[in-house]
Each structure stands twice: as C-alpha cells, then as structure tokens.
Amino acid sequence: MQKFKYLFVALFTFITVNAIAQKQEKVLNYISQYKELAIAEMQRTGVPASITLAQGIHESGSGSSKLAMASNNHFGIKCKSNWTGESVKHDDDAKGECFRKYPSSEDSYKDHSDFLKNGQRYAFLFSLEPTDYQGWANGLKKAGYATNPKYPQVLIKLVEDYQLQDYTLIALGKLQGGIPKNEVVKEEINTKVTPNNTVEEAETVKVEIKSSPTYPEGEFKINETRVVFAKKGTPFLSIAKQYNIDLSKLFEFNDMRPFIEAEKDQLIYIQRKRKTGNEDFHLVKIGETLHDIAQLQAIRLESLQELNWLKKNNVPAVGEKLSLKAKSTSMPKLALKEKYSINVVSKTK
C-alpha cells in the first residue's frame, strides 16, 4: 500500500511538472511571436508593451483560446455599440455575448491599443509612467476592463515571471537586445562639495574593462559543471531539447526566470551548479551583478549569497573580494550610486 502511495505521488509530480513546462513553453512561444507587435503598438499609442503582452497571454490563453483561434481576438474585447466590423457569439459573463472578430492577430493588437487610447474611462492610465506596470494593471481593473477581482495580480505576475518589462524598456529605447543602454562611457573628473558649498575636483577614477573570455563551441565544463555558451538570440527551448532537459529545469539551473531566448551572449548550465566555486575568491568588476558572478564561477546564486552574507538585491562594490569556498568573516561593502570614469580596453567577445 505504501509503495502504491509513493508511485502515485511520483506519477502526480511528473504529470504536474510536465504540465507546467508545457505551459511555460506555450507562453514563451506566444511572447516570441507577438513581442515585436507589442513594442510597435507601444511606440504608436503609448500602451506599455508589458501590459499588452500580459493581457494577450491571459485573455487568449497564449493564443490557444477558442476566441483567439476562431476570431483572432486576443484581448476579449466585446462588440460595444461603436463596433462596425465582423463579430462572433461567445459565452463569457453571459451566454452568447457579442465579441469582435478580426482579419488577423495584428488587427486585434491594433484595435486593443486604440480601444484603450481612445476610451475615455482609460484616459487616466496614460498619465502613468509607461514603466509602471503595476499601476496600469490596477488601473485596468479600476476602469472596468475585466470582472475578475484578481485581474491586476494575474497581469503583474505574468510581467514579472516572464520579464515582460524588458519589452517596454526596448520600446522606450532603454534596452537594446535585452542589455541596458548605458550612458556614453568617457573619462570624467568627479567632484565633491565642501562645507563652504564650493566644488572641488576629486581624483578621477579609472576602471579598466578587459576583453570578455572566449568559450569553446558545444558542451564544456566550468567548476566540473556542464555548460554551453549560448549566442544572443538562441532559443532556450532549443538548448533544453538538445540536451534532453526540462525547460523549467534549465531556468532553475541558471537561476533565471522563464525567458524565450538569450538576450545576450551568455553561459547556460545544463546541470545544477556547485555549492562552492573552483577558486577561493572573486574580485568584483564594474558592471557585474551577483548573477553574473554566479554564472562565471559556476556556483549557485543562493550559495554565493550565503557565503558572503548577502541578500537578494545586494550589489557588492567594485573591487570587493567575494568568497567562493568558505564562509566570509564579514559582508562585503555594497555599491553606492556613484559614477565611475571608465577606461575601456576592449569590449569584443
């Protein structure tokens, strides 16, 4: 009886994990297909791309709902009195309600943007910052877009789980290929204010950024952990399939949220990383995050944090020494919001 119980639990777990992976794959495929359209619509009308994608995913079941498949209606928009196009009957809050039918998905996306932009009850949303996805999510519910009381939480979770905010930033020109567009790098003279409110010159800070390391093609090892070097644009699903790994596990191995493709050249581990590094220490370089260091050293992010008394959002200061093997005796200094003058040696990969 006990054996049967264990078998049932194992089978249930397998089915559940597989279902989650399939759902993630469907969502990622949807984002891949419609992200450019969401970005274009944001640039045309101002509706945040993150909100458009989150609504599309939710309202259309990632493009698989009956309404989306039969009528190209991705946002559940009903006919209303001013609709002059084609329509279909669909059961929603009541039986046989009138919903808009579109010639293509692109027409649905455009009508969704216009529906919000030209609707008086949604006008207040456009006074919000386009990056305020939480304000937009709550505002849509307040304006009566959906009857589900948890509608804002659903949208917010989708934005955060699938990093949809990136597409808003791309539309704003603040992200390029998934990598933040930094200010022009140049040598500056830092200044400070004296007690007499006069400005004195401070010593120029110079930090060299050396060439990124080169990695071999195909599978190799770092810290006895199997890894591949994925070029920008490589679909994560293709990596998972090539190495026979569940997509959800691939993201777990790399301390990542689900995403469609590599937004930059990066290391992707195809087995779980180690709890300790191969080296004793790592010196923090400018621009490095804890995740960057964890990937570079093939150490689990939570282990790196624990060894150095760091919390999730802590960013260690440039030049700090992080322990990779033994528990550090103290927490490293954290980065301040300071400007550094940077002498770029090379950025080529």
Image (tube, rainbow, N blue to C red):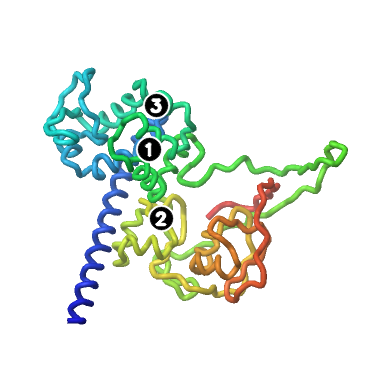
Give the residue type at disc 1. Ile
x, y percentage for residue 28?
32, 49
**Most extreme residue toward the right, as rendered?**
196
Indicate which label's residue lies in the foreground, 3 or 1: 1
Q: In this image, 206 relative to 261: left or right?
A: right
In three-dimensional space, the C-alpha distance between marks 3 and 1, rounded to whole angstroms, equals 15 Å
- What residue is shown with label 2? 257
In three-dimensional space, the C-alpha distance between marks 1 and 2, rounded to whole angstroms, equals 18 Å
Give the mark nearest the N terminus, 1 or 2: 1
Indicate which label's residue lies in the foreground, 2 or 3: 2
Crowd rating for badge 3 (residues with CA inside 10 Å; few <14, some 14–19, many 20+): few
The residue that appears at 22% across and 67% down in the rendered structure is 12
Instruction: Between residue 149 and residue 243, name the one nearer to us.
Output: 149
| Quadrant housing the N terminus | bottom left
Image vertical order of residue 274 relative to residue 49, above or below: below
How many numbered discs sit on the rendered protein?
A: 3
x, y percentage for residue 126?
44, 27
Give the mark nearest the N terminus, 2 or 3: 3
Tag 1 and tag 2, C-beta contact below 8 Å: no
Instruction: Between residue 109 and residue 334, name the one nearer to us.
Output: 334
Tag 2 and tag 3, C-beta contact below 8 Å: no
x, y percentage for residue 49?
39, 36
Tag 3 and tag 1, C-beta contact below 8 Å: no
Instruction: Between residue 118 and residue 104, name the one nearer to us.
Output: 118
Q: Which mark is residue 51?
A: 1
Q: In this image, 262 relative to 90: left or right?
A: right
- What residue is shown with label 3? 44
**Most extreme residue toward the front, as rendered?**
149
Label 2: which secondary element: loop
